[in-house]
Image: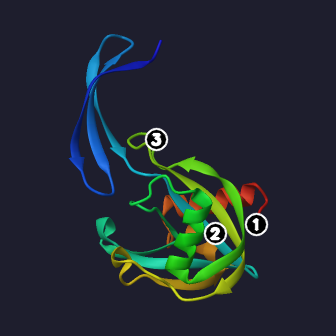
Amino acid sequence: MKEITTLDSKVVYQNKWMTVREDKIKRQSGNSGIYSVVEKADFVIVLPIEDEHIYLVEQYRYPLEKRCLELPQGSWEEEPNADPAELDAGELREETGLVAKQLTYVGFQHLATGYSSQGYHIFLATGLEHTETDLDDEEEGLISQKVSLKEFEAMIIDGTITDASSVNAYGLAKLKQLI
């Protein structure tokens, strides 16, 4: 038997990036309640590493009202079922101007299981070639920078980098001894 039964579901908000739905539920105990779920397409995150250095992007994050450093990442709203490797290569090129000769799949993680179905594919990008960026309108002001792996780890430890998916992607790649 399922732990929770969905009795009714309705979309309460929707735009091209996300859908928010509210579900009326019944628990195993018989108690009822509501559950809100954010549905977003899965995204990719890439670790572009070259000579003991990693490329980061810095961009303004509206919910935090500040510029943040993180790994290149994104999704294609127009193609939510795009091949993750193709999406990864596209986001890397778009945000950093880098093209990887080799993409190594690191794994898949869920972003926030308590309220969202969204997950992300993690790739390690090596053999990097430098080209031009191709930012879209939502990425206005995005800049790319190269830092040493040691400096990147220090920025995680001191709280400069707080993007959980960036920290997790790096940690998973390191645990798998890919870095």
Rendered residue at 56%/78% (across/down): 93
Q: Is residue 122 left or right of residue 141?
A: right
Lower sequence index among marks 2 and 1: 2
- List the residue tagged with mark 3: 113
Residue sitting at the far left: 12
Q: Is residue 115 left or right of residue 102?
A: left
- List the residue tagged with mark 2: 47
Judge the density around disc 2: few (<14), some (14-19), many (≥20) Cα neighbours within 10 Å: many
Q: Can residue 71 be seen in the rendering of this structure?
A: no
Lower sequence index among marks 2 and 3: 2
Of marks 2 and 1, the one in the foreground: 2
Amino acid type of the residue tagged 2 in the rendering: Leu
Q: Is residue 158 left or right of residue 49?
A: left
Q: Position of residue 17 (x, y in %)?
A: 33, 57
Q: CA distance from mark 2 to mark 3?
A: 23 Å
- List the residue tagged with mark 1: 179
- Residue 46, by quadrant, is bottom right
- Residue 123, by quadrant, is bottom right
| Label 2 secondary element | strand
Rendered residue at 30%/57% (across/down): 16
- Above or below residue 136? Residue 30 is above
Q: Position of residue 129 (x, y in %)?
A: 68, 85
Amino acid type of the residue tagged 3 in the rendering: Thr
Quarter of the figure with the C terminus: bottom right
Amino acid type of the residue tagged 1 in the rendering: Ile
| Label 3 secondary element | loop
Judge the density around disc 1: few (<14), some (14-19), many (≥20) Cα neighbours within 10 Å: some
Q: How is the image coloured?
A: rainbow
Q: Can residue 136 be seen in the rendering of this structure?
A: yes
Q: Nearer the viewer, residue 65 or 97?
A: 97
Rendered residue at 59%/88% (across/down): 131
